Amino acid sequence: MRLAPGSSTTCSPCHDTLVTVRSGCRGCHLPAHHADDSAVVVDGEHGSYRFLGNVMSKVFGPNVLLGGQGVKGIEDDDWEQTVSATDHNVYSGTEIVYSKDVGAYLSNEVIGEVCTGCHGNFHHEMNSGQTGAAGDLSGVWIRHPSDVLIPDEGEYAAYTTYNPLAPVAKQNLTVAMANSSVVTPGEDIVTCISCHRPHGSPYPDMLRWDYDTCDAGTANDECGCYVCHTAKD
């Protein structure tokens, strides 16, 4: 492969910034122009959802690191030109505790694994009592949980109609899930992009909404926190 100016190792596609890497988009997106992506549910064997694939396979070769790995998803026909509860992308998610590891990268084909490629295993370090994958998940969160089930009790159980302001991921994607308005607490997944826009937003931390306007006790349809935390608005 061709390295970016000033790069010296094959690790550069990830460990340089996306600004200096030649065609920085390829830090996450791997063009697969000849892949057959006609299926409703597109995975790593079909070019991956929005070409989100295993960049390590481009560095070390597809036979070394399972080059078929990529994000699984269902893309809406007019991607984000029109958005509603019945007109949206469908993302693949998991509650499996995965690892930021070169050989395991994107092995679950879920959207959150792409984020950990740069941002680390944020979902692993959930509270001070946790010690790795087998740690305690019941304590005080040190950051918002990701790759976890939406609880099917309390205020969370009321999130049953899909809201594009705070999208959730599905496990075990099927054709029937395309544009589904149904959210199922206890089965569906909170993921990184439930709160953040990967390509940026007008708000701090690339949030999907202005967090400063989220005032508990005040109705605010533009605060995504209240989509799941239904008793807080």
Image: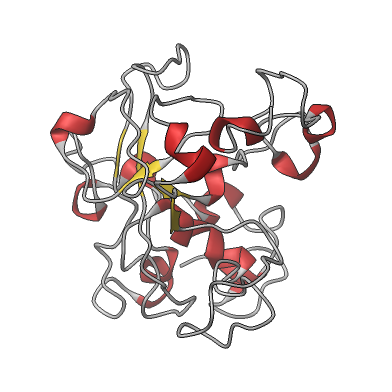
Q: Is residue 104 visible?
A: yes
Of the pair 189 and 73, the residue shown nearer to us: 189
Which image quadrant: the C terminus? top right
Residue depicted at 38% across the width and 40% down the height: 50
Residue depicted at 55% across the width and 50% down the height: 192
Q: Residue 55, how many percent across, how many down?
A: 43, 63
Up/down of 89 relative to 124, above or below = above
Farthest right residue? 212
Q: Is residue 113 left or right of residue 65?
A: right
Of the pair 9 and 75, the residue shown nearer to us: 75
Q: Is residue 43 left or right of residue 25?
A: left
Q: Is residue 23 visible?
A: no
Q: Is residue 172 left or right of residue 123?
A: left
Up/down of 97 relative to 173, above or below = below
Of the pair 215 and 50, the residue shown nearer to us: 215
Residue depicted at 82% across the width and 27% down the height: 213
Of the pair 190 and 116, the residue shown nearer to us: 190
Residue 74: quarter of image? top left
Q: Residue 19, how many percent across, how many down?
A: 71, 52
Q: Residue 77, how many percent across, how many down?
A: 31, 19
Residue depicted at 26% across the width and 72% down the height: 66
Q: Residue 160, how many percent across, how many down?
A: 38, 29
Residue 105: quarter of image? bottom left
Question: In this figure, what is the number of numbered marks?
Answer: 0
Farthest top residue? 82
Question: Which colour scheme appears in the figure?
Answer: secondary structure
Up/down of 141 relative to 151, above or below = below
Q: Is residue 231 left or right of residue 72?
A: right
